Amino acid sequence: MPLAILLVLILIAVLIAPWLIGVAIAAAIAAAALYGTYLVAAAVIAIAALVVAVAWVLITGNSRQEKPEEIHGERKACKYCQVEMAASASRCGSCGKSSP
Ligand SMILES: [Zn+2]
C-alpha cells in the first residue's frame, strides 16, 4: 500500500514539477533507512496532502482572476440615454435624469 501511495505522489510530481521526483525518491529512501516504512508512508501522505493543497490554491487562484468580470453585471444602462452606470446610482451621470 505505501508503494501505491508513493506512485500516486510521483505521478502528481510529474504533472507539477519534474524535479520533485528526485527530491521525493531521495527523501523516501533516506527516511526509510532512518525510520521505517510506516513513518515513510505517513510522510508521503503528508507531502501528497501538501501537493494537493498547492494545486488547490493554484486552481482557486486562477478562478478568482475571472471574478472581476462580475462587476460588469452590477451595472445598468440609463433608461433615457443608454449610458452605462453603477446599478446603485440613482441619477445618470451623463444626462442627469433620475433612474429607477
Ligand atoms: Zn442618462
Image (cartoon, grey):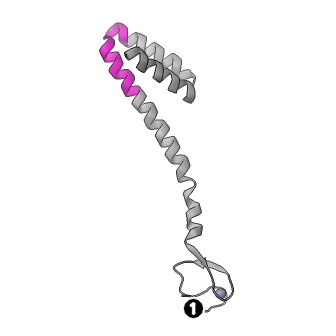
Magenta segment main secondary structure: helix
Which quadrant holds the N terminus?
top left
Q: Measuring from the top left, give residue 34's x and y in whole percent.
A: 33, 9
Q: Which residue is mark 1?
A: 98
Whether the magenta-drawn stretch holds residue 42 is answered as yes
Q: Amino acid at mark 1?
A: Ser
Which region is colored magenta? 32-47
- Who is closer to the viewer here, 29 or 84? 84
Which quadrant holds the C terminus?
bottom right
**Can you tell me whether the CB of the residue at mark 1 lies under 8 Å from the nearest atom of ligand 1?**
no
* 61 relative to 1, above or below: below
Quadrant of the picture in which ligand 1 is shown? bottom right
Q: Measuring from the top left, give residue 58's x and y in whole percent.
A: 52, 41
Task: Tell whether 19 sits left or right of 30.
Answer: right
Asked which secondary structure carries label 1, the reply is: loop
Identified at 33% across, 22% down, the residue is 42
Q: Measuring from the top left, give residue 62's x and y in whole percent.
A: 55, 47
Identified at 61% across, 92% down, the residue is 97
Task: Tell whether 98 sits left or right of 50.
Answer: right
Q: Looking at this rendering, what residue extends furthest in the top direction?
A: 33
Judge the density around disc 1: few (<14), some (14-19), many (≥20) Cα neighbours within 10 Å: few
Identified at 53% across, 86% down, the residue is 90
Whether the magenta-drawn stretch holds residue 60 is answered as no
Quarter occupied by residue 68: bottom right
Q: Looking at this rendering, what residue extends furthest in the bottom direction?
A: 97
